[in-house]
Structure formats: C-alpha cells, structure tokens
Image: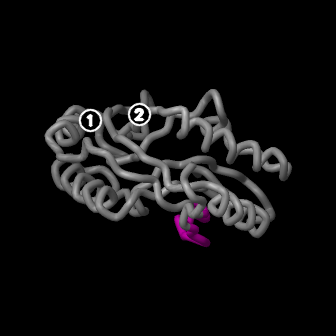
C-alpha cells in the first residue's frame, strides 16, 4: 500500500535539478525500474495528518525562516530493501542537520510526528535516482551514477508539500531568509 500522508521535500536549484533529471532518464532507459516522477528532492519528513492545512502553514513559515542551503551530492548508495532504490547522497553538513532538526522541532511543536525513517537520528538524506530497479540492475544504475557529471555543488532552494500516495504538489515555497 505504501505511505499515506504528506511528504515535505527540499528542492534543488534549477541547474542541479536538470542534471538529476538527465541521470533519472539514463538510469530508467538503461536499467528499467519505475519513472521517479517527481521533482528532484531530498525528503525532510513524511507525516500522516488529518490537517494538511496546518502542515502547509508550518512549511510556509519554515521557508520564510530559512535561507537556501549549499549542497554537495558527493556519494551514491542503495538501500538494502526489495524496493530497488539507488540514490545520490549529500555531504551531511551541520547546516543540513540543523535544518532537518529545526523542521522536526516545528512538527513536534505542532503535535505532528514524522514517519520513523525521517526523524532526527534515523534520517538518511538522499535524492532517489532509481526506484523499483530489478536486483540485477542495481550495479548498472550505480555505474550510471559514477559515470555522470552529477557530483558538483548546488543549493537547496525551496520546500514543498506533496500529497501521498497521489504525488501531487500542494504547495511550494522558496527558502527566503537571508544567509547569516
């Protein structure tokens, strides 16, 4: 059945997003699997709530309070599950961890709780580039990542609220606070 609820996702700058989309296409064409079908992102949280308006308002305020964040996608990986996921992993900086922690504190302050995989201390920040890949194609997808020009610097520029399992964007907000 999958997740039911709402995902809160961080979006990359347009140049990095375009490179990730090209990598998605290469992996999908070369290795199969499902089309990723969403904006390139790093998920902050998945929350099951009967009050999406509350989560949307919280996300909007959060965006106003946080600046764009430099990001470096410098590693690739796969999860040890049957979902056939290959991902790009960012360098885990203090700023990224603080952003994540701050968002989860906002959730807690509003009596909202994220699914366990997304909570501080359990979160593995990642950008999915292949999903539902056949087990025998995981190594090929990793090779596509290694051969790509994806390993460079960019920024996380926006935060969005996505309805699941429909994968429908309800709102998107630019991270707009001034950098310190």
- Scheme by which the image is coloured: one colour
Note whether 95 is above or below 157 in the view shown.
above
Which of the pair 4/17 is nearer the observer?
Answer: 17
Quarter of image, res 24: bottom left
- Residue 42 in the image, given as x and y percentages of width and height: 48, 48
Magenta-drawn stretch contains 79: no
User: How far is mark 2 from mark 1, CA to CA?
Assistant: 22 Å
- Residue stretch in magenta: 161-173
Q: Residue at x 22, y 49 (%)?
A: 27
Q: Secondary structure at mark 2?
A: loop
Q: Which residue is mark 2?
A: 91
Q: Are marks 2 and 1 in contact (CB under 8 Å)?
A: no
Please report whichever mark, 2 or 1, sits nearer to the chain's N-terminal start.
2
Numbered mark located on residue 138 in the image:
1
- Residue 153 in the image, given as x and y percentages of width and height: 32, 46
Note whether 58 is above or below 33 in the view shown.
below
**Magenta highlight: main SS:** strand
88 left or right of 116 in image: left
152 left or right of 60 in image: left
- Residue 136 in the image, given as x and y percentages of width and height: 23, 33
Q: Residue at x 42, y 27 (%)?
A: 80
Numbered mark located on residue 58 in the image:
none
Q: Secondary structure at mark 1?
A: helix
- Residue 52 in the image, given as x and y percentages of width and height: 74, 66
Q: Residue 164, can we see it?
A: yes
Q: Residue at x 31, y 56 (%)?
A: 16
24 left or right of 156 in image: left
Which of the pair 60/128 is nearer the observer?
Answer: 60
- Residue extending farthest to the front is 180
Q: How would you rate the neighbour count of disc 2 (Cα within 10 Å): few for under 14, some for 14-19, many for 20 or more? A: some
């Amino acid at each position: 059945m999958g997740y039911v609820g709402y995902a809160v996702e961080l979006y990359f700058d347009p140049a990095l997003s375009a490179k990730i989309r090209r990598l998605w296409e290469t992996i999908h064409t070369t290795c199969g699997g499902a089309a990723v079908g969403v904006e390139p992102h790093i998920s902050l949280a998945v929350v099951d709530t009967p009050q999406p308006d509350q989560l949307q308002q919280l996300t909007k305020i959060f965006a106003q309070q946080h600046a764009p964040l430099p990001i470096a996608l410098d590693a690739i990986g796969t999860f040890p599950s049957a979902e056939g996921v290959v991902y790009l992993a960012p360098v885990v900086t203090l700023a990224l961890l603080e952003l994540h922690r701050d968002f989860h504190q906002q959730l807690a302050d509003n009596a909202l709780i994220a699914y366990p995989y997304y909570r501080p201390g359990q979160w593995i920040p990642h950008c999915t580039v292949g999903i539902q890949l056949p087990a025998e194609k995981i190594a090929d997808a990793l090779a596509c990542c290694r051969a790509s020009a994806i390993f460079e610097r960019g920024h996380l520029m926006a935060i969005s609220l996505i309805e699941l399992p429909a994968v429908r964007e309800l709102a998107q907000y630019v991270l707009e606070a001034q950098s310190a």
